[in-house]
Image: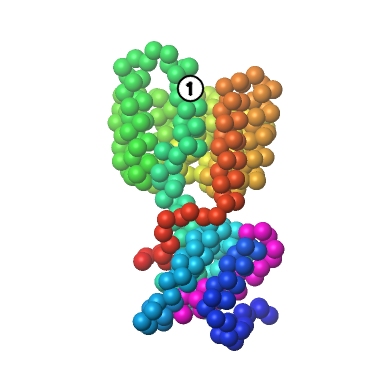
């Protein structure tokens, strides 16, 4: 039977002691010391209720409010770890169904908040350092292929640039319109066709996307090139789940694809799976180095260093500017 937090013990504690207990439990959580996350939920509920009741008194407990705000930021910082410890989104959803917490108790909805935060981050990922690195790789390859692009080629990359901006804003329909305009002048351009397939996938038009991918592969006559370009386009579209699946398909086709492991690492990093991302980065670097791909190897090293720096910063106390609210608030 599921262990229930002892409400009578919580009731007997002073607000200061209760806040200290929550803070201590979050510290244990961050250090992997086996704290029950359901206790934290119950403690947050109790502390929030007491602070709300105290707001009607003559002397609101400002220091306690500040401590609760700090605790909220800490819980937000450890949100992913908290969710994993409780058993994932499904387990938390089941608890919500049982307890029916009010929407303002955002910690009960931290899975939804994390997903919203991740989605918002991905929509802006074209401007983040990680995606910039990927775009730089694409630009290097493009420059090597088109040292002196003609007018039609320039129009193509102008359309792609505009489509990327539309994707960064979450407007996939507008991005598709821009790619279709470019295809009107270059109907057999495999890069544009693959981009179109990715956008059709994002718009839920799977059958049409499959047809476009098949058309591009027929032009390329190179399945590995199709997979590599498609994976990169998924990354630029801010869709790490699809780019991960596409990278895995690329690696299955060519187990020695340095690009495949690099794209897989970037996808895992964007999905918050730093451990598996690091393994993929190491494999990608080893392959690129052994294959004499010095520019790719250097890019991989930079990406690894940036991820490690980000991981180290996450070990420090949070500096989030505001406490999240429940979805829909």
**As rendered, which of 314 and 240 lies closer to the eye?**
314
Q: Is residue 245 visible?
A: no
Helix, strand or loop at label 1? It is helix
Q: Residues within 10 Å of mark 1 (few under 14, many from 20)?
A: some
Image quadrant assignment for residue 298: top right
Query: Residue placed at 33% from the left, 27% from the top?
Result: 158
Image quadrant assignment for residue 254: top right
Query: Residue placed at 54% from the left, 72% from the top?
Result: 19
Please state if 240 lies on the left or on the right of 195 as rendered.
right
Residue 114, percent from left and from top: 49, 57
Residue 35, percent from left and from top: 66, 68
User: In the rendered view, would you say 89 is above or below 146?
Assistant: below
Task: Please give the residue where the numbered disc 1 appears in the rendered image.
Answer: 140
What is the image's colouring? Answer: rainbow
Residue 177, percent from left and from top: 30, 37
Quarter of the image where the N terminus is located:
bottom right
Magenta range is 30-50
Query: Residue placed at 45% from the left, 22% from the top?
Result: 142
User: In the rendered view, would you say 286 is above or below 267?
Assistant: above
User: In the rendered view, would you say 297 is above or below 103?
Assistant: above
Residue 34 colored magenta?
yes
Residue 220 colored magenta?
no
| Predominant secondary structure, magenta span | helix
């Amino acid at each position: 039977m599921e262990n229930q937090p002892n409400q009578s013990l919580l009731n007997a504690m002073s607000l200061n002691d209760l806040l200290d207990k929550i803070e201590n439990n979050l510290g244990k959580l961050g250090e992997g010391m086996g704290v029950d996350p359901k206790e934290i939920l119950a403690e947050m509920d109790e502390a929030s209720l007491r602070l709300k009741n105290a707001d009607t008194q003559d002397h609101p407990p400002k220091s306690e409010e500040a401590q609760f705000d700090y605790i909220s930021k800490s819980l937000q910082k450890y949100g992913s770890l908290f969710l994993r410890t409780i058993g994932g989104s499904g387990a938390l959803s089941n608890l919500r169904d049982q307890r029916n917490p009010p929407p303002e108790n955002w910690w009960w909805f931290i899975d939804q908040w994390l997903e919203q935060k991740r989605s918002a981050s991905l929509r802006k990922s074209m401007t983040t350092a990680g995606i910039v690195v990927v775009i730089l790789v694409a630009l290097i390859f493009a420059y090597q292929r088109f040292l002196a692009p003609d007018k039609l080629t320039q129009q193509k990359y102008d359309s792609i640039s505009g489509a990327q901006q539309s994707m960064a804003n979450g407007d996939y329909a507008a991005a598709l319109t821009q790619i279709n305009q470019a295809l009107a002048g270059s109907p057999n351009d495999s890069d544009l066709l693959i981009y179109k397939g990715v956008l059709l996938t994002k718009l839920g038009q799977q059958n049409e996307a499959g047809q476009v991918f098949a058309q591009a592969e027929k032009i390329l006559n190179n399945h590995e090139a199709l997979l590599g370009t498609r994976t990169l386009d998924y990354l630029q579209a801010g869709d790490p789940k699809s780019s991960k699946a596409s990278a895995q398909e690329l690696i299955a086709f060519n187990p020695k694809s340095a690009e495949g492991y690099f794209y897989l690492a970037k996808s895992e990093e964007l999905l918050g799976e730093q451990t598996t991302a690091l393994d993929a980065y190491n494999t990608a670097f080893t392959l690129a180095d052994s294959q004499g791909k010095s520019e790719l190897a250097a890019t991989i090293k930079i990406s690894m260093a940036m991820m490690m720096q980000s991981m180290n910063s996450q070990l420090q106390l949070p500096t989030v500017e505001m406490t999240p609210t429940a979805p829909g608030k």
